[in-house]
Image (tube, helix red, strand yellow):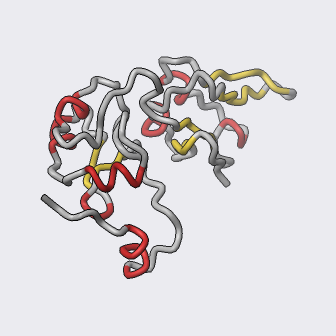
Amino acid sequence: MQQAINHSRRRLFRAKISPCNAVRPPWSLPEEQFLNSCERCNDCITACETNLLKRGDGGFPEADFSHAECTFCEACVNACNHGAISKNTSHQPWQITAQIKSNCLAQNKVHCRTCSEQCEQEAIQFRLAPGGIALPNLETELCNGCGACVASCPVSAIAVLPANEKTL
């Protein structure tokens, strides 16, 4: 069995001053508990049906929304035998939400509604604004953090971040 990792020490030696902002698999334990429980076996990565999960910093799994979305199929939960990912029905799979950045085509007067077309939750709606331009409106309470809108955006104007964090 592996020893617990001292992550603050690891960040010091790797010159990482800011905390890790990787999005872990859905239903993961809180970050420190996840890092101490995860054996970096890649079982969840292999099981992921959409190839959303990849091997990230330190070999820990993280979500890469630039190429895939999460369908909440629970394959990663079922594959994890170490307890780092465990479905808890008392809370959402993630505490993350999509955020639209200023380089959004629609916000720059170019017709585009790709993100809205990909959003099954209908969290992104376009509302007509003065001048006849339809602008995206993100209802964060409807967003489940699946990331379907991220990969579809032609200018990478959507990020999936912790619900309490704002983009630049």
Q: Is residue 146 left or right of residue 57?
A: right
Query: Residue 63: x, y in percent?
Result: 36, 45
Task: Name the spot of residue 64 as percent of width and height, x first.
Answer: 37, 46
Q: Residue at x 65, y 29 (%)?
A: 138
Q: Nearer the viewer, residue 72 or 108?
A: 72
Q: Nearer the viewer, residue 54 or 88?
A: 88
Q: Quadrant of the C terminus?
A: bottom right
> In the displayed structure, would residue 24 be above or below residue 126?
below
- The residue that appears at 27% across and 63% down in the rendered structure is 4
Q: Is residue 98 above or below residue 102?
A: above
For the N terminus, give its image quadrant. bottom left
Residue sitting farthest toward the right: 130
Q: How many marks?
A: 0
**Left or right for 120, reference 87:** right
**Res. 48 image quadrant:** top left
Residue 104 in the image, given as x and y percentages of width and height:
63, 42
Please indicate whether residue 8 sits to the left or right of residue 5 in the image: right
Question: Considering depth in this image, is 28 or 43 the residue closer to the camera?
Answer: 28
Which residue corresponds to the image point at 30% horizontal and 66% vertical from the top-left?
A: 5
Q: Is residue 53 left or right of residue 133?
A: left
Identified at 44% across, 80% down, the residue is 15
